[in-house]
């Protein structure tokens, strides 16, 4: 028995030794500081990435006037956020970390740098940050994300749009009439679809119904948008769309790839895509499959008009490790990539492969469709050649014109299980009302249940924060 | 004592190649099943990314049990697991009985190969197949029932039907694979018993219930007890891929809840607390069923 225990203990010790993470160690090679970077979908052994990292390294070294080496961490396949968290938990914390969730727990332990003073002292960053970025940084100064807000723009196939009159819809009624026309012209198709919920559609319709923020001021206090009277009006509208077959009956079980497939195969006329390059992808794929392009549409106008962009925090972005011995240098790297030179490098890809130069002209190659910015996508950057097509650019124009800050806030840790329960309750009622299983009168019952389930606690917290 | 040791040594030497073959399995279980038990202590700690974890006792269990939905999530897990055991446990036994009665060797092999196949499909693929088949009103199933005058049913969004969708998709996936053990057990029954029964004039039914069933009863009991150990695993992959907003409150199980609240937010302690809770219930179920089985049938797992 004793022998068995000894053997098992030995196995445990050996395995612990094998799996234990190494201690944090600042790497300097031949006096050259090394910045370790971890990022999603940038394996450092792929030829394009090797060439890109080399270019950034050279450009950055010239920018800071000293030689710096960039070392990318190769991440295992699978869910990035989970793998990253486990890597950090094992004690391996790179200098510069790209997060796509899971950062709060690490920030709460003071392991991420508060970037406020760095940003305050950087002219480049001041120029690059949009208002909503600044609000997010004020709420949560650990993640930097210089890219357009991920608002979804209504997108319609061009031929069906022209068939329906070709007039850009402005009001909710305009949108309704456009959808009716699509259905009349193509009875076998749905006018519009979404992906498992109405989050994408909401970008176009929320403000028109008066849902101007996550927390709406009603009288002297704040009310959650999901239990507001404006939400009830919006659900009444969605219910009508569903009942008349304008909203795809299968939207609840449709994933993003299913949505795109329906769009490219003529089963639906309008979808909602992330503004920018995504709309260009829709355009190109629809052109390939149906020989027509897409038209981007603005948010509906009603009580208000716009895309509410949460100010709670960035949902993804770059963070600097508080344990890094080169914090200033790491921030400088983020800054360099926000300069015009850095943006050119990051946005246009590799010369000879993704673009070619003819004199002063930069000409994009077909391969450029496979390149995406590894760091920032600054909206105000003016490159030598337009990076976006007509639809993509139009959707960005709408974002620039209509994006408005939503003074939201992160839900505190102790309320996360309650918030999860409230979200699930809302999801179930929302679908049942839209699908007609519940009448709209059930909305009041939902509101009561929402408060009883813990909504009162969250609302109380919101009113404390927002006052 | 010395004699026993000598005997053991001799046995080990005699079967050395078998033990060598067993070594990778043992290593696998030590690394992935025994060492993680030590890691379960983080259910009682606040995890620190740098430095020592802080002992917090039952804090994470309190958070787990005080969640407004944990009881519902727990009950969903039990309901879905119970429904699965109710169907997924006996059906492979029946299938093994039926296959045993097939006289054509080739036909049996073809059937077996076809019914094993779904076991190798991932839940992502299976979910896609079932969602497509069960769509309302255009899915194949709705077209078939529509032929008989039944109105289309939105199986995937109906709280009345969704759990049965889980159960039947699980049956489809596992019935063939799970029957292997019973087929093997049936093949081990001495043929003389059937010959003697035939001479005595026993019918096929009588042979099945008087010879086959009692002969494979120890296998059935062992598999049942082991299945109960996994009772709280209601099938994360399946539920995750098949659930949607319309039914989330009826199919959200402990695993999906932990994934959302625990792993999704990097809250490993909460996730481990839920995992430990599940493990303790599984252990309790195994031990109590084993004891009950020994009392009633004289057979247990070990």
Image (cartoon, coloured by chain):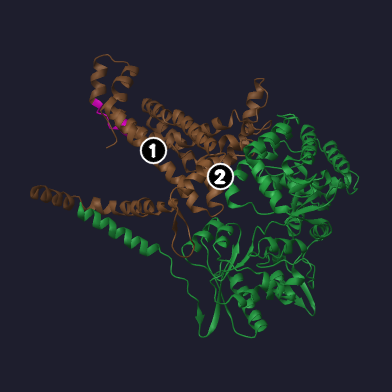
Chain colours: A green, B brown
Side of B2 relative to A300 (left or right) = left
Front residue of this view, candidates B147 and A255: A255
Q: Is residue A275 above or below residue B93?
A: below
Pick whichever of labels 2 and 1 is earlier in the sequence: 2
Q: Which residue is mark 2?
A: B124
For label 1, count other residues whose C-alpha is less than 10 Å away and answer few (under 14), some (14-19) or many (20+).
Answer: many
Q: Is residue B190 magenta?
A: yes
Query: Label 2 to label 1, Cα distance in Å?
Result: 25 Å
Q: Which residue is mark 1?
A: B229
Magenta stretch bounds: B184-191
Residue A443 shows in the view:
yes
Q: Is residue B264 above or below residue B121?
A: below
Chain holding disc 2:
B
Residue A353 shows in the view:
no
Q: Looking at the picture, how far across and down is residue B223, in whole percent?
A: 35, 34
| Majority secondary structure of magenta residues | helix
Q: Is residue A103 magenta?
A: no
- The residue lying at 20 percent from left, 54 percent from top is A2
- The residue lying at 28 percent from left, 60 percent from top is A10
Q: Dot 2: what SS? A: helix
Q: Which numbered disc, 2 or 1, marks the residue closer to the eye?
A: 1
Q: Looking at the picture, how far across and down is residue A116, in whole percent?
A: 67, 69
């Amino acid at each position: 028995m004793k022998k068995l225990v000894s053997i098992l203990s030995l196995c445990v010790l050996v395995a612990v030794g094998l799996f234990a993470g190494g201690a944090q160690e600042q790497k300097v090679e031949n006096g050259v500081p090394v910045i370790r970077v971890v990022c999603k979908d940038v394996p450092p052994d792929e030829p394009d990435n090797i060439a890109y990292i080399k270019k950034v390294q050279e450009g950055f070294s010239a920018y800071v006037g000293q030689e710096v080496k960039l070392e990318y961490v190769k991440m295992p396949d699978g869910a990035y956020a989970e793998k990253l968290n486990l890597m950090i938990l094992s004690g391996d914390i790179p200098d510069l970390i790209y997060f796509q969730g899971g950062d709060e727990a690490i920030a709460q332990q003071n392991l991420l740098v508060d970037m406020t003073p760095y940003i305050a002292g950087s002219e480049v960053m001041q120029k690059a940050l949009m208002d909503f970025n600044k609000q997010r940084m004020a709420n949560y100064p650990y993640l930097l994300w210089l890219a357009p807000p991920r608002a979804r723009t209504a997108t319609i196939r061009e031929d069906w749009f022209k068939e329906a009159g070709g007039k850009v819809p402005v009001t909710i009624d305009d949108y309704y009439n456009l959808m009716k026309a699509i259905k009349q012209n193509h009875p076998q198709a749905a006018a519009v679809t979404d992906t498992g919920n109405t989050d994408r559609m909401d970008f176009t319709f929320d403000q028109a119904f008066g849902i101007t923020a996550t927390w709406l001021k009603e009288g002297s206090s704040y009310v959650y948008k999901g239990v507001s009277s404006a939400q009830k009006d919006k659900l009444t509208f969605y219910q009508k769309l569903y009942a008349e077959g304008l909203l795809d009956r299968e939207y609840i079980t449709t994933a993003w790839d299913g949505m795109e497939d329906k769009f490219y195969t003529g089963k639906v006329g309008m979808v909602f895509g992330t503004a920018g390059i995504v709309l260009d992808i829709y355009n190109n794929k629809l052109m390939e499959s149906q020989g027509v392009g897409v038209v981007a549409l603005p948010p509906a106008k009603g009580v208000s008009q716009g895309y509410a962009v949460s100010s709670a925090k960035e949902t993804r972005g770059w963070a600097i490790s508080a344990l890094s011995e080169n914090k200033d240098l790491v921030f400088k790297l983020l800054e360099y990539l926000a300069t015009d030179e850095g943006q050119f490098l990051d946005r246009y890809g590799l010369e000879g492969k993704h673009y070619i130069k003819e004199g002063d002209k930069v000409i994009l190659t077909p391969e450029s469709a496979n390149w995406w910015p590894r760091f920032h996508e600054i909206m105000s950057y003016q490159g030598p050649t337009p990076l976006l097509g007509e639809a993509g650019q139009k959707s960005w124009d709408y974002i620039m014109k209509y994006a408005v800050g939503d003074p939201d806030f992160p839900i505190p840790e102790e309320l996360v299980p309650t918030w999860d329960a409230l979200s699930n309750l809302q999801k179930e009622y929302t679908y049942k009302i839209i699908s007609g299983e519940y009448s709209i009168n059930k909305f009041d019952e939902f509101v009561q249940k929402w408060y009883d389930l813990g909504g009162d606690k969250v609302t109380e917290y919101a009113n404390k924060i927002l006052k | 004592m010395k004699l026993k040791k000598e005997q053991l040594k001799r046995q080990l030497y005699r079967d050395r190649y078998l033990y060598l073959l067993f070594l990778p399995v043992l290593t696998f279980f030590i690394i992935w099943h025994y060492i993680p038990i030590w890691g379960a202590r983080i259910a009682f700690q606040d995890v620190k990314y740098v430095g020592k974890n802080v002992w917090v006792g039952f804090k994470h269990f309190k958070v787990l049990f005080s969640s407004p939905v944990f009881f519902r999530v727990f009950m969903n897990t039990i309901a879905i697991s119970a429904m699965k055991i109710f169907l997924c446990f006996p059906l492979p036994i029946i299938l093994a009985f039926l296959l045993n009665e097939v006289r054509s060797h080739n036909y049996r092999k073809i059937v077996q190969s076809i019914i094993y196949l779904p076991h190798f499909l991932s839940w992502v693929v299976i979910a896609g197949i079932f969602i497509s088949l069960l769509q309302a009103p255009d899915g194949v199933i709705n077209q078939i029932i529509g032929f008989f005058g039944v109105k289309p049913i939105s199986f995937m969004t109906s709280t009345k039907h969704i759990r049965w969708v889980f159960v039947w998709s699980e049956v489809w996936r596992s019935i063939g694979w799970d029957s292997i053990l019973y087929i093997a057990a049936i093949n081990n029954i001495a043929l003389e018993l059937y010959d003697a029964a035939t001479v005595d004039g026993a019918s096929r039914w009588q042979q099945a219930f008087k010879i086959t069933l009692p002969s494979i009863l120890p296998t059935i009991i062992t598999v049942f007890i082991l299945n109960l150990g996994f009772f709280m695993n209601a099938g994360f992959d399946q539920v995750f891929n098949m659930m949607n907003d319309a039914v989330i409150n009826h199919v959200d199980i402990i695993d999906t809840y932990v994934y959302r609240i625990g792993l999704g937010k990097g809250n490993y302690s909460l996730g481990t607390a839920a995992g430990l809770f599940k493990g303790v219930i599984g252990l309790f179920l195994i031990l109590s069923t084993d004891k009950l089985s020994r009392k009633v049938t004289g057979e247990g797992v070990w």
